[in-house]
Image (spheres, coloured by chain):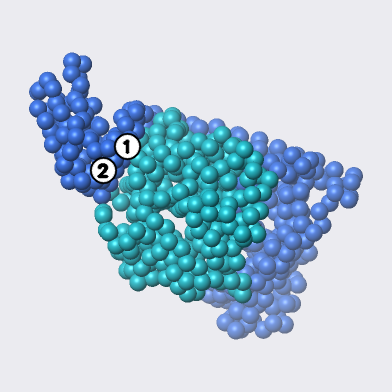
Chain colours: A blue, B cyan
Amino acid sequence: MALCAAGNWTARFAPALERIVSDAEKLRGSRPHIFIDVSQVASLDTFGAWLIERLRRSLSDATAEAKIAGLSANYSSLVDEVSRVGAAPRVDSTSLSLLGMLEQIGRTVAGIGGTIISLVDMLGAVIAAAGNVLIHPRSFRLASTVHHLEQVCWRAVPIVVLITFLIGCIISQQGIFHFRQFGADIFVVDMLGVLVLREIGVLLVAIMVAGRSGSAYTAELGSMKMREEIDALRTMGFDPIEVLILPRMLAIMLALPILAFLGAMAALYGGGLVAWLYGGVDPEAFLLRLRDAISIDHFIVGMIKAPVMAAVIGIVACVEGLAVQGSAESLGQHTTASVVKGIFFVIVMDGVFAIFFASIGM
Amino acid sequence: MAEQFSDAIIRVRDITVQFGKTRVLDGLNLDVKRGEILGFVGPSGAGKSVLTRTIIGLVPKVAGSIEVFGVDLDAANSAQRRAVERRWGILFQQGALFSSLTVRQNIQFPVREYLRVSQRLLDEIMIAKLAMVGLKPEVADRYPSELSGGMIKRVALARALALDPELVFLDEPTSGLDPIGAGDFDELVRTLQRTLGLTVFMVTHDLDSLYTACDRIAVLGNGKIIAAGSIADMKASQHPWLQQYFNGKRARAVVG
């Protein structure tokens, strides 16, 4: 029996051709000798040639092999080429199962231990590099540190000041609105002072820095890792920790206290402004009350927390950056993880500090 | 698919490309004929890649016109442009494989977007394309970061060929390959051109490629085509750069 293929057997018509071939494959086993006549085919490309080859294979059996006839010389090399193609390997599809989900959860939990080990590892490496720089001050990279300080601190000032200013305004407005019911308007100053200097100021700025600079660190180090730049550094005899990470860590640890201070001032200014315009607390009374309500301890507590939080953000960002694998997707995942983990650890640290300062009575 | 508009599959007329004040291409004319392998050479930084990118529409031009498959790309609407883009394949210098997709997904990506065919056919075509560029089916589920430089070029070529294009742009296909790998690649391009009836526009520095793979050579210099023709024409040319390039020490080593 002869099957006759005609017309254009090209990629553009592949969907229709596939249906024709599937129909023809049902003839399997019905006749002993089958010829596929392709003399009427007007044009042929890989798709068409493969579909004809697929038909030929499925019509062949142990006793008789189907044959292709009428092939023009132009296309014979193409058909030869596809006739050598083997079967496609199966995709090992990851099916959704309960066991698989449980396994995923288990792996994630086990991964937490790994995260903590890698953070401690990085902390140790950074301290070692810092010690090395103290012994050999010439190897300190001042230009790089200043560059990162500009990126992390100076360029962050406008947005940090703006946001903390607005937060100060909101705290003050909400305080006055609710305290007024008890005739306790003036206590809004106490609340604002303690919150801004001790808790919110630092925490808010730390979260902003984690989002703004932690992500940038991860993306920079990650793309350097992807393009083997870090390996290049290492082969030239430089320690990537010393060259890349130490300047970044120093910059962020200097930047966060500065930003936290500026943020606290902006928030107090915003709060005072709203207390005056909205609550009728004039600036002189505001300052007098602030002096009574706030001791220097509150400010010191905030300033002690800032560099520690910066260190946590920096270390998380650098660990994630160096963990980036070869793909763009991996870079995205690690940048996300950097921000999420950075903010998480900042909040955990804040809780630890709260307990610590409460127990030493500060 | 047999538009007999003319012999030229790409027709570039008087194109000028400028970056700031530097004029990279200055009134350049070039024809690429159907079914040929055109080798495109010139000194580093002369604008070979810029011309390629201008033809495929990634770099804007100041003046001139470009016709591909008889379609003027400036006058074409988006549907016509898409139709043209479906008919060409491009191999970028660094491969430009999608790093978060496997080799399988990379090759299937254009097919999946343009044709509604079954997963089975997608897989079979992917394997056929891999075989054509000389790779084993086992690499199908690897990610680009797990491939060697030569394999990346081959996979990128397989992706460029995924939709059976009539025209392929190769930007330095053999750079970064060892001489044997480069020789194989030239052979591969030759074979594919014969089996699939491709037209190939190949930017290259590789003298071996010019000798073994190319039908015709065009030379870029000072923003213009300074010469076009066969190897023999090139060697006969009196242009100093061509003299140095084709009759220099390295060239003699190639010819033997």
Q: Nearer the viewer, residue A120 or B217?
A: B217
Residue indicated by mark 2? A44
Quadrant housing the N terminus of chain B: bottom left
Residue placed under numbered mark 1 in the picture: A78
Residues under numbered marks 1 and 2 in contact, where contact means CB atoms less than 8 Å apart: yes
- The chain containing the residue under callout 1 comes to A
> Residue at 67% across / 76% down in the picture?
A269
Q: Quadrant of residue B252?
A: top right
Residue A85 visible, this angle: yes
Q: What is the x, y in percent for residue A137?
A: 89, 50
Coordinates of residue B145 in the picture (x, y in percent): 54, 40
Mark positioned earlier in the residue sequence (1 or 2): 2
Which quadrant of the figure has residue A20?
Answer: top left
Depicted A182 relative to depicted B183: above or below: below
Residue at (76, 53) in percent of width and height: A247
- Mark 1 crowdedness (10 Å alpha carbons): few <14, some 14-19, many ≥20: many
Name the element at disc 2. Answer: strand
Residue placed most toward the observer, A323 or A59: A59
Disc 1/disc 2 C-alpha distance (Å): 9 Å
Which element is circle 1 on?
A: helix
